[in-house]
Image: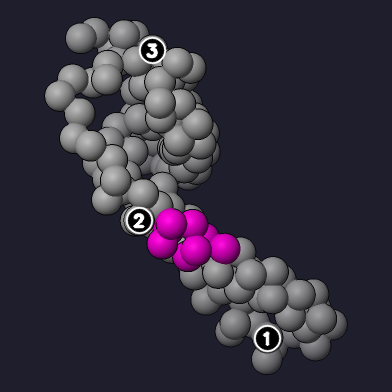
Amino acid sequence: MNNAKAIQAYLNPKSKQETFNMQEFEFAVKVELECGKLKAAKVTNNYPFLIMMIAPSHSSESLIYCKRIQVTKAESKIHEIIPNLGKLNKEKEILHLDLTNMETELNDFKRELTKRLEQVQKIPVLKKFED
């Protein structure tokens, strides 16, 4: 199967997994666009076709890949906020609000990950990519 057909099959609106695939694809594209903030490390150089090829490959590595990234990113943001709580008096209220929001977001992502893990158990193994 060539690259264009692989992308088309993955994003097929008639697929049983269309909603799942579109959500995963959207998140994976965002992750890919965030990667390589240093020009030398930016493999795709934001070239749309390369990003469209890489995004589904992330999801194909593991059906929980994107959910795990969301949890990890939220945890990372929380760890960035906590050390600053004791340092900045003017921004303390804002940081507390940010921390509360990130903890809520983290809990939501963890629930979504748990739900995805349950769903993964029900997904049959595909014989062909187009299934």
Which residue is found at the position 39% from the left and 36% from the top?
A: 42
CA–CA distance in space, label 3 to label 2:
27 Å
Left or right of 60 on screen, residue 45: right
Residues in magenta, as a range: 108-115
| Earlier-in-chain disc, 3 versus 1 | 3
Along the line of sight, the residue nearer the viewer: 69 or 17: 17
Identify the secondary structure beneath mark 2: helix
Residue 45 visible at all = no
Q: Quadrant of the N terminus?
A: top left
Q: Position of residue 17 (x, y in %)?
A: 41, 30
| Earlier-in-chain disc, 1 versus 2 | 1
Which residue is found at the position 47% from the left and 42% from the top?
A: 31
Identify the secondary structure beneath mark 1: loop
Q: Is residue 27 above or below residue 54?
A: below
Quadrant for residue 124, please give it: top left
Q: Position of residue 128 (x, y in %)?
A: 18, 20
Residue 118: numbered disc: 2
Q: Is residue 38 above or below residue 44?
A: below
Kindly report the secondary structure that dominates the magenta region of the rendered protein.
helix
- Amino acid type, residue under disc 3 in the picture: Gln
CA–CA distance in space, label 3 to label 1:
47 Å
Viewer-nearest of discs 1 and 2: 2
Along the line of sight, the residue nearer the viewer: 30 or 43: 30
Residue 5 visible at all = yes
Q: In this figure, which colouring scheme has been used for the structure?
A: one colour
Q: Which residue is mark 3?
A: 8
- Amino acid type, residue under disc 1 in the picture: Leu
CA–CA distance in space, label 1 to label 2:
37 Å
Q: Which residue is mark 1?
A: 85
